[in-house]
Image (cartoon, rainbow, N blue to C red):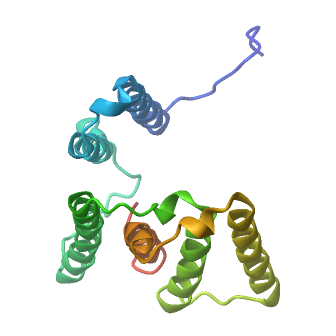
Amino acid sequence: MSNFPIIFGIIGKKLYLTIILAIILLIYIIIINKIPKGHNISLINNLGGSLIQMLSIFIPCIFKFKGKSKTSKIKFTKSMFKDYFILSLIGLSIRGMNILIEYLDFEAAPIDEMSICSLFSIIFYFLLSMIILKTKYYIHNIISLILFCTCSVINDLIFGNLKEIELASFLSLIPTLIEDLLNCYIKYLIDEKFHCY
């Protein structure tokens, strides 16, 4: 027994990798918070986030982190190309819709800051998971979905957010719904196609 009150045990490359990625993410968040509110540029912010995501791919290559299996060499196939191409298209469409919304510069109150946005997002996840992931929902899932939707509408009624909604407000909902599609597709790639996250 060690006299030290906290024992870490064997620290392998996996733990070092997790700590390094967490430190990089914390540095990124600190730098983003240091930018004054009026001076941030969305393109630079998105590029920074993309660089952080790319580091999560390149750091394991730098440290030569390998699995225990000697036969785990992955060959790039047409199916993998199609999967990643669709993933890239969905990601680019999110960015494209954000640029389009910034370009249009509409005056309506954005719906993505209201509780009703969560309502649309949950319903969209519900439909996508049934179509893409073939998820089966039971009665208690549907009851909780109905309760959540009711509470979202009541919350917006109490704060008077529904009075501010115009037809143009729903345009700000489109990137959120495409992002839901992206998350659902990532889960599909992990669960059904067995791709690594």
Q: Which image quadrant for residue 172?
A: bottom left
Residue 136, how many percent across, how many down?
66, 90
Q: Which image quadrant for residue 87?
A: bottom left
Query: Which residue is at the front of the view, 164 or 51?
Result: 164
Query: Which residue is at the front of the view, 93 or 84?
Result: 93
Residue at 41% over, 67% down: 179
Residue at 75% over, 85% down: 142
**For this view, does 189 lie left or right of residue 10?**
left
In the picture, the quarter occupied by the C terminus is: bottom left
Residue 41, how many percent across, how many down?
24, 39
Q: Is residue 61 visible?
A: yes
Residue at 43% over, 77% down: 167
60 is higher (above) or lower (below) than 110:
above
Query: Which residue is at the front of the view, 74 or 20?
Result: 20
Query: Which residue is at the front of the view, 9 or 112?
Result: 112
2 is higher (above) or lower (below) than 108:
above
> Farthest residue in the top direction?
3
In the picture, the quarter occupied by the N terminus is: top right
19 is higher (above) or lower (below) than 142:
above
Q: Which image quadrant for residue 94?
A: bottom left
**For this view, does 100 lie left or right of residue 132?**
left
Q: Is residue 64 visible?
A: no
Residue 144, how many percent across, how many down?
78, 77
